[in-house]
Amino acid sequence: MSGQPVLMDQDGGGDDFLAAALLLTMDHVETIGIVVTPGDCYIEPAVSVTRKLLDLMDRPDIPVAKSTVRGLNPFPGAWRSLSFAVDHLPVLNDSDTIRTPLVPESGQAFMARVLREAPEPVTVLETGPLTTVAAALEIAPDIEGKIKEIVWMGGALNVPGNVAEPGHDGSAEWNVYWDPFAARRIWETSIPIVLCPLDITNRVPVTTELVRQLGRQRRYPLSDFAAHCYAMVVKESYFFWDVLTAAYVGRPDLFTLREWETVIVTEGPGQGRTRVEPGGRKIMAMDQVDIEAFYAYILEQWAR
Ligand code: RIB
Ligand code: CA
């Protein structure tokens, strides 16, 4: 392989597409596929956006697969609807046809197969719930040894969560809450986990200034795409959740990590919480990031 193999699984949020758009700019990375999990999206437009984005980046050779898993706690409809709007952005719609194919097998079967066939361990970049990874492990338990590490946007360790649902205590982050049992399943493996929790993403907001800077360089298709995606959400509290997670794959030197022992809460009002608990599963979490260098990095990477 020509670079570090990375398999991405994303759940179709605006920032998921942009995380993919960042990953594909990384010279040292060989993206071996993109799976779309039906989490923070409606699946048809989310798959469509992913394929059109690969067309835009002239990478129709990268397979896209549609996961058929289901979560316990659906994302809010208003968040999921963004996938329809993004699918209609002008920069993605110069052509009536999509070159990048959708593989015929399910996303979880595709994941199991490509990991099994990979000649070396693969980094899994996960920007949605862990359900598809758990389903792939169910299909092919032997792939555990083929995953070098999972870099996951998920969890809230020492800050409140972002779930505001009736009966919930607010301690969970959405990617865990969508399917806490899948997260617990991954916690039971020995796969190294690098977490990008709300603790760090809360410090990296999508700012008006950054969106305007992207807009000013919209002669570049990726900046045009990013500026439009962010323009639709900048009025909300929106953070670089998935894009920050992807940036770790490209520029780990911008981050410091810290080890924590954690458990996944699967029941009760704290369902989906990632609780710090001595004796729990060891994970590494992104702890500090050079925020200005991160902003400069994405502006540079998307100037194409
Ligand atoms: O909690 C933020 C996460 O939920 C992000 O990955 C966003 O895209 C949604 O999936
Ligand atoms: Ca996501």
Image: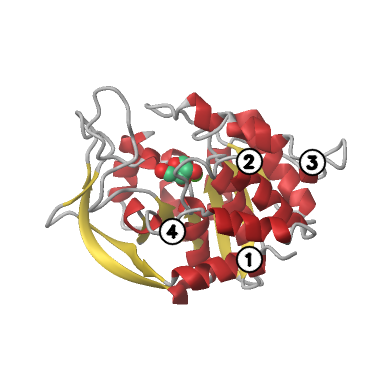
- What is the distance, in whole Å, between disc 1 and disc 2 at their CAs? 28 Å
Q: Position of residue 291 (x, y in %)?
A: 45, 68
Of helix, strand and loop, which one carries label 4? loop
- What is the distance, in whole Å, between disc 3 and disc 1 at their CAs? 20 Å
Closer to viewer: mark 1 or mark 2: 1
- CB-based contact (under 8 Å), mark 4 and mark 3: no
Which residue lies under the disc numbered 3? 90
Say whether disc 3 or disc 1 marks the residue closer to the N-terminus: 3
Say whether disc 2 or disc 3 marks the residue closer to the N-terminus: 2
Q: Residue at x 58, y 64 (%)?
A: 5
- What is the distance, in whole Å, between disc 4 and disc 2 at their CAs? 30 Å
Closer to viewer: mark 4 or mark 2: 4
Which class describes the residues within 10 Å of circle 4: few (<14), some (14-19), or many (20+)?
A: many
Residue 100's place in the image compared with 83, above or below, is below
- CB-based contact (under 8 Å), mark 4 and mark 2: no
Q: Residue at x 14, y 53 (%)?
A: 277
In which quadrant is the C terminus drawn? bottom right
Front-most of residues 283 and 169: 169
Say whether disc 1 or disc 4 marks the residue closer to the N-terminus: 4
Q: Which mark is residue 299?
A: 1
Q: Which mark is residue 65?
A: 2
- What is the distance, in whole Å, between disc 1 and disc 4 at their CAs? 14 Å
- What is the distance, in whole Å, between disc 4 and disc 3 at their CAs? 28 Å
Of helix, strand and loop, which one carries label 2? strand
Amino acid type at image mark 4: Val
Q: Position of residue 2 (x, y in %)?
A: 66, 72
Which residue lies under the disc numbered 4? 204
Q: Residue at x 58, y 70 (%)?
A: 297
Of helix, strand and loop, which one carries label 3? helix
